[in-house]
Image (cartoon, coloured by chain):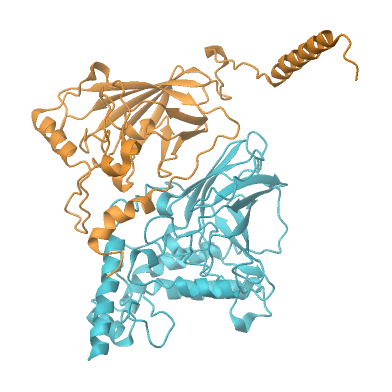
Chain colours: A cyan, B orange
Amino acid sequence: MQVLGQDEPPPSALINQGTEEVVEAARAASIRSGEETFAYFEGEVDEALAKAIERVWDPERPRTPSPRTPWGDPDLRGFWVNGTYTPLERPVALAEKPLYSIQEAIEVFQGDVLRDAAVDPATVHYDWTEFGMDNWQSPIPPSRRTSLIFDPPDGRIPPLTAAGRERWEAQARRDTLHSRHPTERCIVGSEGPPRVPFIQQIGESHIIQTPDYLVVIRQSNNDVRVIPLDGRPHPPESVRAWLGVARGHWEGDTLVIETTNFHEDRTWVRPRGLGGNLHLIERLTRVAEDLVLYEATLTDPTTWEAPWTYEIPWPRMDPPGIFEWACHEHNYGIINVVRGAQVRAEEYEAQSAD
Amino acid sequence: MTHNNSNGTRALVLAAAVLLLIGSRLAGAQTPLDDTAASISRTAEGRPDLSGIWQSFTTANWNILAHSAETGPHDGLMGVWSAQRGGLSIVEGNEIPYLPWAAEKQKENYANRMVINVTNDPSRFDTGDPEIQCFRAGVPRANYMPFPFQIVQTPEQVFMIYEYKGAYREINMDSDSLAPNDTWMGWSNGRWEGDTLVVDVTGFNGYTWFDRTGNFHSEALHVVERWTPLSPYHVRYEATIEDPNVFTRPWTMSFTLYKHIDPSAQLIEFNCVPFAEELMYEPLGLFGR
């Protein structure tokens, strides 16, 4: 848990979870050290790294034509993983460096994997031998990109407008149900649209295709998007949806999905500050037998001063695919999180009163 | 303007107007639909293609047995908005063969059908109709809720996507796979018997109801569905229900599904979680201290 980036947390923030004393105490109490947890995974890590470095994602490599469905459309069918170690925004130090060399990409990936596999006992809340769904345990490739965002060229989300900044502040999570994100309330899953990678083990999706529809079923919250390909228009603005309303059409080998009509109360964990005015263009292209390239352009002049675009390669995932995710059915999490925040807020107020 | 022969002129104008009217109605006339069994659309493999948007038009979600129209909940506030239509039974024989304990349990369910006690204790079972809380409807109820659902059919799988809550089912075709876990919507294996899609559904978690009157089952529920197209626009749906924990024998329900034919037909998101939150969470103080 991170303390929200402020020196003086507001009374209703989730506080003291991440203080150094608490973390040190958890490490001291753990039956296993970070080194021991890593040793448990070391063989698997070596194997995963050996496979991964053969499949570095290189945006500059020429693409081959997409395989086709029996009825002749580019074939996007299958199970695909939306996961990565590449940060969404480019570190400021790398502003002028949009691409690593292949060798650099491999070294950065290895570092990320080793850090991920070395579990800090203070941060694990499941039995660490069971929670085996780190990114490196999926077939995600190293990438030459230094950030997922490549437009604007500095690889960073454009500045917020004044309205966007206001919305950012308003979206701080507090001790009420309505201040929590729609993902915590099980209204939507953790990844959009757009598919901004969230936490690793829920980035899977299943793409089903017919001549008339593309259907995307996500593991996270089992969100289903039914995307007509017949050129029908979007409904009027008076029809809104938490997942937006999508329309798809082919441009060469690429499926272009245009999504609007987002619910007025829609917010995102990432990117924060965005509201229901999002105009989203997503592009899906099968760039290899085992890879779909996902690209998204986000436009909302009420939130950012300019649109921005990012891409992430989705490796193929083996079956079994998606399981039922009955998030809202007995969502104890939201009850405990809000009550916990209320308790913390009361404690904080009591401390401040002393 | 002359008024010579004005009656004749008027008659001509009238006749012309009538002809124009008939002509425009003919020009706007729709081609009648071909709804014969012979024109059922088929896949490349020769099977019926059930793809499309379907909906049943019974009152079974309220009560799967025969019932009159009745006053609804909070009628002092809502008047006719909450009233319910009457309807005939979708259950063959209009009788559910409950074991004696289960017949009593159904009455208890009915009495408590709107009592929602959300807790964060996983060992307790919340009361009330799961539909009130926007929980998944399960099978077969999802098929007779007053919402459309979309079938997307591929050779390997048939997907059913329900407008209610965006719940979905995957029907694994020609598979004898076992349910990996218990779920709300069950685990569905399907096969064709002639033109009938037979779906065997198991792996239920036992939490769903059959309707709003508290007709229920246990996690041992076993449903065998038969989806038989009668025309390109009609499907006959039958489901045989078995649950030795609850019923003395299997029993069957059936009704007709109708296809939405407007080219603009689509599921409109019905994400009911926000509609249930005040009922569920306000009593726990989650709306504010």
Residue A84: x and y in percent read: 52, 65
The quadrant of the picture occupied by the N terminus of chain B is top right
Q: Residue B38, relative to residue A287: is it above or below?
A: above
Query: Is residue A88 placed above or below A351 in the rendered structure?
Result: above
Residue A127 at least partly seen = no
Q: Give me the residue at 41% from left, 53% from top.
A: A221
**Image point 34% across, 81% down: which residue?**
A18
Quick one: B57 or A137, which is closer to the camera?
B57
Front position in the image: B11 or A288:
B11
**The residue positioned farthest toward the left in the image shown:** B100
> Quarter of the image holding residue A182?
bottom left
Question: Which quadrant of the view contains residue B24?
Answer: top right
Where does residue A270 sit, x and y in percent of width and height?
50, 67
Expressed as whole percent of the image width and height from the top left, the position of residue A245 reads 56, 48
Of residues B114 and B12, the one drawn nearer to the viewer in this rendering = B12
Nearest the viewer among B223 and A279 is: A279
Q: Is residue B263 above or below residue A49?
A: above
Q: Is residue B116 left or right of residue A276?
A: left
